[in-house]
Image (cartoon, helix red, strand yellow):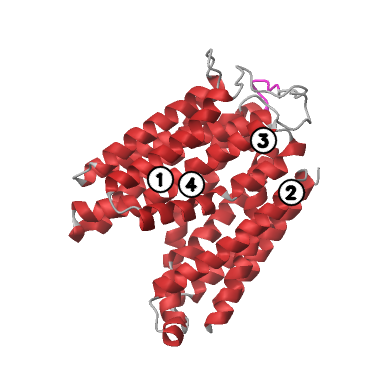
Amino acid sequence: MRDGTAPSPAFTVGLGVAYLAAFIAMAPLLGMLVPLRAEAIDAGAKEAILSTALFWGAITAAVSNVAAGVLSDRTRSRLGRRRPWMAGGVAVVLAAYGVIASATTGAALTAGVVLFQIGFNALLAALLALFADRVPPIARGRLSAVMGVSYPLGNMVGAALVGGWLTQDGARFGALGAILAVGVLPFVFRIRDHADGARDGEKPLKATPDSVAARFGPFAHRDFVLVWLGRSAMTTGFVVGSVYLLYFITTDTNFQARYAAPPEAGLALLTGVSFGVVLGVSLVLGLAGGRLRHRRGAAVTGAAVLALSGGLLAMASDWPWVVAAFAIHGLGTGIYYAVETGLMVDALPPRDRKGGDLGLINLAAALPQAWAPLMALAALDVFQAGYRPVLWLSAVAFALGALLFAALKRN
């Protein structure tokens, strides 16, 4: 592949399908099946069991993503660098399904979640590294948009499959395992995965032992730091804005009084509205493509729109205005997620350690999962004004993300 040429349609479709399958395998597991398993183990202690499992799973995710990326960079085998980690990740995820499905104690459930995070992050790290290896900047726009919509689409498809169509645990886990295997393994076995992942024409960065790059790695590069901080701010905004959204609907809006429906119905409606807008925006931007300066502008725009939506949501109480604010939220989410993956890869320094560097940049999505709920709780305690201060905090985080992305280089 010459530098600047687009990958083949088969590679593009295969990577997009594999990425989507990975998130279908993940979203309903952590959002539905693990909580249900915790309740089945001990209904009276389900919160403690679930919190423990998810906490250790989050720690494992942060560590294993970096480790898998670094190790895949150094892998030299007849199967290539990334293929063993993708195939191994699928195998470990399937094994984790068995452990979780059969767990009868909190410790067993935690072990299953930890095992799942090891496998899932090995797979995810390899897929993202392969994106960086094989997709030049000019071709990243469309594929980044497809990958950006994978999580919300995977969450929707997985929830419908697991929560609606299938009722038995065996069938649920079997369906997720089949989707993962069918979506990922054909791509794994068909791709050409070279021992050296650098694209033709790319000159790897040479760092002397005493150089800044050698001491600080990718954090010696300005754009990498800005994207890392910007992604941290964005993830913080998303988590802070969602953690108490159900309670906000219950106490700070007129949804229940207006429609005599439970707040869960309102949350489902908002989620559907947001997803529809996200999907439409992602498809439009995917067709547009674009280089770094375009992704930079899209990231700034998406973050700014999200900040606006957070402020509007914090001021809304009448339900139609809440829905309108969430439609704007979906617009910002779609714009941002359509370029996030490409923006991350654009910010990588030109050196042959893309897997490890992407693992480090993925910490910007993992670490806020720990601190964002604490920030939301602190906002409740400090302001004592319902859940609106939490939404304002989310808006501020998105605004900070916009400022950080605006400071990126234009080319």
Amino acid type at circle 2 is Leu
Is label 4 in a helix, a strand or a loop? helix
Amino acid type at circle 1 is Ala
Tag in front: 2 or 3 = 2
Farthest bottom residue?
Answer: 257
Residue at figure coordinates x 74%, y 49% from the top left: 287
Q: Quadrant of residue 32?
A: bottom left
Q: Earlier in the sequence, mark 1 or mark 2?
A: 1
- Image marks 1 and 4: residues in contact by CB distance under 8 Å: yes
Q: Earlier in the sequence, mark 2 or mark 4?
A: 2
Q: Earlier in the sequence, mark 2 or mark 3?
A: 2
Task: Please indicate, yes or no, whether residue 307 appears anywhere in the rendered image.
Answer: yes
According to the picture, the residue beneath numbered tag 1 turns out to be 58
Residue at figure coordinates x 65%, y 51% from the top left: 338
User: Magenta span has 208?
Assistant: yes
Pinpoint residue 277: horizontal percent, then vertical percent.
Answer: 62, 63
